[in-house]
Image (spheres, rainbow, N blue to C red):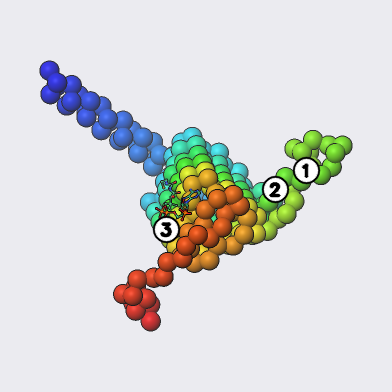
Amino acid sequence: MRGLARVCGAACLGLYRLIVRARAKAFSLAISGAFDSFGRRTVIELPVRLHGERRIALGSDVFVGAGSWLQALGDGRLNVGDGTSIAGGCILSAASSVRLGRKVLVARNVYVSDHIHAYVDTERAVLEQGLTHLDAVDIGDGAWLGENVVVCPGVRIGRGAVIGANAVVREDVPDHALAVGIPAHVVSRFAPLPAAAGARN
Ligand SMILES: CC(C)(COP(=O)(O)OP(=O)(O)OC[C@H]1O[C@@H](n2cnc3c(N)ncnc32)[C@H](O)[C@@H]1OP(=O)(O)O)[C@@H](O)C(=O)NCCC(=O)NCCS
């Protein structure tokens, strides 16, 4: 009896995974032409919120997990490099320029924005005050942003840098550094392995 339940469970899960993958793939293929560019094997899972797709460029082998929101406002541009993986529930919002490099790992519920809402006008609701502090954000190749990370306008995160869960990044983080906390600060740096360093020369 236990064996049969296991086989049925595995079969149902297999079917579920197949349906989820097929649906995401079909949706991605159907919408790909609307983007500035949309690389091969790139997949966006449903549900997703999209705005300004004409100014959104996604490389190849990009994964955008369910519940994410990608937007390019006004003349803003959003670029996501090849092989970057965005777990889901993430917001990438560009009113100027947001660039994620290649093979960036983005955990769930990460928020990256190159602007904030203006808020100092006491006569108007924040949502009526427009945007301010527009300043490009750049996240280097191979970086890793942990769960719930917030990246603020004007920040550059270096190649291979790691941002600990729940950090709010307000200043640049150098290549191959670990930054944590609110506001995020660098707690360690790690040099490339000798073999990798040699390969680059
Ligand atoms: C970033 C992370 C991977 C670092 O792990 P690690 O290499 O083991 O780092 P350490 O534990 O040596 O931490 C170094 C210091 O930073 C602190 N630190 C690490 N992560 C932190 C965090 N998220 N917030 C605040 N401080 C943190 C540690 O307490 C330690 O401080 P100390 O030297 O004063 O004791 C880990 O802490 C983390 O945030 N994990 C969550 C990753 C995640 O979101 N994964 C989702 C799947 S993609």
The amino acid type, in three-letter code, at marker 3 is Lys
What residue is shown with label 3? 103
Identify which residue, 61 or 200, lies in the foreground: 200
**Total marks in image:** 3
The amino acid type, in three-letter code, at marker 1 is Tyr
The residue located at (56%, 57%) in the rendering is 185
Provide residue 49's location: percent of width, then percent of height: 55, 38
Location of the N terminus (image quadrant): top left
Provide residue 192's location: percent of width, then percent of height: 39, 70
The amino acid type, in three-letter code, at marker 2 is Ile
Q: Are marks 2 and 3 in contact (CB under 8 Å)?
A: no
Q: CA distance from mark 2 to mark 3?
A: 27 Å
Identify which residue, 23 or 61, lies in the foreground: 61
Determine whether the residue tagged by mark 1 lies in a helix, strand or loop: loop
What residue is shown with label 1? 119
Q: CA distance from mark 1 to mark 2?
A: 9 Å
The label nearer to you, 2 versus 3, is 2
What residue is shown with label 2? 116
Q: Are marks 1 and 2 in contact (CB under 8 Å)?
A: yes
The residue located at (18%, 21%) in the rendering is 5
Identify which residue, 160 or 63, lies in the foreground: 160
The label nearer to you, 3 versus 1, is 1
Determine whether the residue tagged by mark 3 lies in a helix, strand or loop: loop
Provide residue 153's location: percent of width, then percent of height: 65, 55
